[in-house]
């Protein structure tokens, strides 16, 4: 039976041992809703079959305890969160269960002991109104979670309604969390600190060369060469070549922007050609390639750069307008 928020909360209080179950490949809406309810009422958060990238970031950053592949029979009741069909739960045997969900049609409610079902833009908003009615304080971690759930479920507010913004505004007011913190948490920074150090060091060693209106960058790093060359494209390079030493051999990882590839740069071909003069292998795609050879790193980097220069020289960069290009003839170095 459909119940309202107060009734829903009161009925949950009848159970000692609640499993909050998230659909397979759980998203931040599911995880944050389960987390907020478990913090307020108590119980265990279960992932029926993994979670997506942002949800896993959330679990990590907010230090949320989750159980993988839980067995509902070990709990007094299962609250199915943010899920409309049994197939989203891999048709797991549920036993006694209830549902909280915002999807337009929710087949699961048919056999539920009780359920809360609204057409909200996220389950997180529904959970927030339950917490409000309970008079539960909106703690920092819960607020960061719920806000992330709302942001992702509304496609960064593309599908948001008046009610969405009202809930967001109230969560921010009650918790003291800043919206910028939510965005920061969701930003995809490299996780691993050794990777971040390697990439930052690699950036400080960069040689930046201007070929007409193209920027060609090379550098070296002890590991994470591929990630480092991608980083240089993100911060402005058109082509990046990153050397890494490996015992007696070296590796060069190359990346080229789509515009550079369209202008004729084919790193796979370049790496293959350069490697043919040495012992080793080289190749890959036009925009992403690598070479592993037993040779001096600087010589290989220079050979690769020379081949890239030959292609880029006098090729117009379509993203730069012509009058800037005239200027560059004077300042080209
Ligand atoms: Mn949802």
Image (spheres, grey):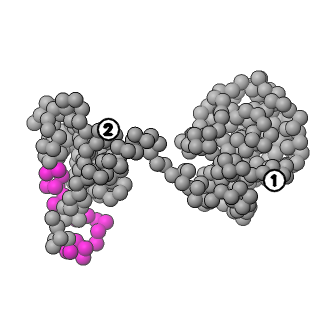
Q: Quadrant of the N terminus?
A: top right
* Outermost residue, left side: 277
Q: Is residue 216 left or right of residue 177?
A: left
The secondary element bearing badge 2 is classed as loop
For label 1, the residue is 132
- Residue visible at 39% across and 41% down in the picture: 195
Q: Which comes before the other along the chain, label 2 or label 1?
A: 1
- Quarter assignment of residue 314: bottom left
Q: Residues within 10 Å of mark 2 (few under 14, many from 20)?
A: some
121 vs 303: above or below: below
The secondary element bearing badge 1 is classed as helix
Measure the alpha-carbon separation of dots 2 and 1: 50 Å
In the depicted view, which residue is nearer to us: 90 or 190?
190
On residue 223, which mark appears? 2
Residue 28, how many percent across, how many down? 63, 45
The question of residue 313 being in magenta is answered with yes
Look at the image and give the residue range highlighted in magenta. 305-327
Q: Residues within 10 Å of mark 1 (few under 14, many from 20)?
A: some
- Residue visible at 14% across and 35% down in the picture: 295
């Amino acid at each position: 039976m459909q119940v309202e928020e107060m009734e829903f909360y009161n009925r949950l209080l009848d159970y000692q041992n609640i499993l909050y179950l998230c659909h397979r490949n759980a998203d931040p809406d599911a995880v944050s809703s389960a987390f907020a309810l478990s913090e307020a009422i108590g119980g265990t958060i279960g992932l029926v079959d993994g979670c997506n990238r942002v949800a896993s970031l959330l679990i990590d950053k907010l230090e949320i305890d989750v159980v993988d592949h839980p067995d509902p029979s070990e709990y007094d009741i299962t609250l199915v969160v943010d899920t409309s069909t049994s197939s989203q739960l891999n048709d797991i045997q549920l036993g006694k269960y209830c549902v909280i969900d915002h999807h337009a049609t929710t087949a699961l409610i048919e056999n539920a002991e009780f359920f809360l079902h609204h057409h909200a833009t996220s389950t997180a908003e529904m959970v927030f109104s339950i917490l409000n009615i309970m008079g539960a304080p909106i703690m920092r971690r819960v607020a960061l979670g719920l806000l992330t759930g709302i942001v992702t479920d509304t496609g960064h507010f593309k599908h948001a309604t008046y009610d969405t913004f009202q809930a967001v505004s109230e969560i921010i007011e009650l918790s003291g969390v800043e919206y910028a913190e939510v965005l920061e948490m969701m930003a995809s920074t490299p996780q691993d600190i050794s990777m971040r150090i390697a990439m930052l060091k690699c950036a400080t060693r960069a040689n930046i060369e201007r070929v007409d209106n193209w920027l060609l960058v090379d550098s070296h790093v002890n590991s994470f060469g591929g990630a480092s060359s991608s980083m240089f494209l993100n911060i402005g390079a058109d082509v990046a070549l990153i050397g890494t030493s490996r015992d007696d051999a070296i590796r060069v990882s190359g990346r080229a922007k789509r515009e550079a590839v369209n202008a004729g740069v084919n790193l796979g071909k370049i790496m293959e050609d350069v490697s043919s003069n040495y012992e080793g292998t080289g190749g890959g795609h036009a925009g992403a390639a690598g070479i592993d050879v037993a040779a001096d790193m600087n010589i290989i980097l220079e050979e690769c750069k020379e081949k890239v220069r030959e292609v880029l020289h006098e090729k117009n960069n379509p993203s730069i307008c012509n009058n800037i290009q005239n200027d560059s003839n004077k300042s080209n170095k």
